[in-house]
Amino acid sequence: MHTRAIDGLPRPVSRLGLGCWAIGGRGWGPDEGEAAAAAAIGAALDAGITLFDTAPIYGDGEADRRLRRALGPRIRDVTVATKVGPRGEPPVCDLTPQHLRRDVEASLRRLGVDRLDLVQAHWPCDLGTPLEATVEALTALRDEGKIAAFGLCNYGPVDLADACRRGPVATLQTPLSWIRREYEGELRRVVEAHRLGVLAYEPLARGLLTGKFDRLPRFDAGDVRRNDPRFWAARFARLAPRVERLRRAARALGVPPSALAIAWVASRPTVTTVLFGAKRAEQVQQNVRAFELLDDPRLGRL
Ligand SMILES: NC(=O)c1ccc[n+]([C@@H]2O[C@H](COP(=O)([O-])OP(=O)(O)OC[C@H]3O[C@@H](n4cnc5c(N)ncnc54)[C@H](OP(=O)(O)O)[C@@H]3O)[C@@H](O)[C@H]2O)c1
């Protein structure tokens, strides 16, 4: 089965989802432009992807606009997950009830829909708003029909459990990859206890697990990877043998390393959907080969 249900969401979601951060055209090297973004989204649809993850800060709304134009009327047949909270530059996460409402209204307008499928707090509030007030405000937006369901991103186990006791949290969005597994401890136990849907992000470690970086890459100013220690000499060298192991395993299975990295995350217990980023159709086409490996017992032995 290539889809899974999440309580509260209007329709099942595909087990691979397209993350639209890079599609917003900022933070990931040169903008590949709207045509490339549309081609990437089209390739995802062709492969059976029905979940698209976006956020107001991805290209300052540009990811939403490109997604809306590329999907056209199909936007009502797929699930668009978006986020709320960050504002300003550098962004602070504002989860006050007033700002949540403003963000939701703006996303409804940008995406051109009557109701948002899934709204996620982008990260814990930087302004000290009590979690209770945030959950209450999101529940009110749900009860008004402006959003179908809500979730949290980047929360730790204590706050996640607290939020789940206070209201109908549907999902957690959290990093998980072949080289980043902190999710698989207490956080996973909270997810299991509250039966949350899990959207696992950054499965390619921002491109590292595609195996394309034979030597230490240099990124332009403004590329998020410039400040990522995984792309600094010492950590990059330490990770190299694990990347090589993934590359060899992918060769043995006859798929690109990116597909294996994504399928491995999809195979982890409790993961509903794996969100991978891509800027071009060819990247999507390589990555969706992960569909071939879903539920393959060989993944468990890696
Ligand atoms: N909630 C949160 O706080 C949060 C945080 C991070 C991400 N996310 C979500 O998760 C999604 C995925 O995470 P991510 O985009 O950060 O990281 P990722 O999926 O680990 O890496 C995506 C990047 O890897 C490169 N890539 C992808 N496929 C490739 C291929 N087949 N061959 C070569 N390079 C390839 C592309 O960048 P280049 O071509 O530039 O190398 C692409 O932008 C995001 O788009 C976003 O929706 C959410």
Image (spheres, rainbow, N blue to C red):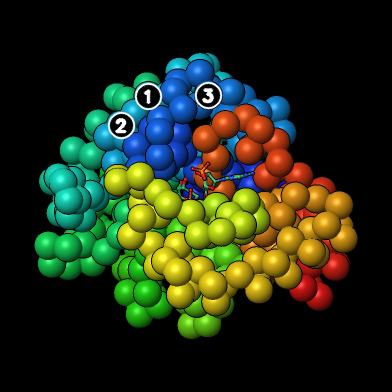
Q: Which residue is drawn at 45% across and 62% down?
A: 231
- Of residues 78 and 60, the one nearer the viewer is 60
Marks 2 and 1 sit apart, C-alpha to C-alpha, by 6 Å
Which label's residue is closer to the chain start, 1 or 3? 3
Quadrant of the snapshot with the C terminus: bottom right
Q: Residue 161 appears at what percent x and percent y?
A: 39, 75
**Contact, mark 2 vs mark 1 (Cβ under 8 Å):** yes
Which label's residue is closer to the chain start, 2 or 3? 3
Q: Mark 1 points at which residue?
A: 65
Query: Is label 3 in a helix, a strand or a loop?
Result: helix
- Of residues 295 and 166, the one nearer the viewer is 295
**Contact, mark 1 vs mark 3 (Cβ under 8 Å):** no
Q: Is ligand 1 closer than 8 angstroms to the Cβ of mark 2?
A: no
Amino acid type, callout 2: Gly
Amino acid type, callout 1: Arg
Instruction: Tell me the tag on residue 61.
Output: 2
Q: Would residue 208 be seen by someone viewing this image from the given angle? A: yes
Count residues near mark 1 (Cα–Cα under 10 Å), then give few for <14, some for 14-19, many for 20+. Answer: some
Q: Name the residue under label 3.
A: 36
- Of residues 44 and 73, the one nearer the viewer is 44
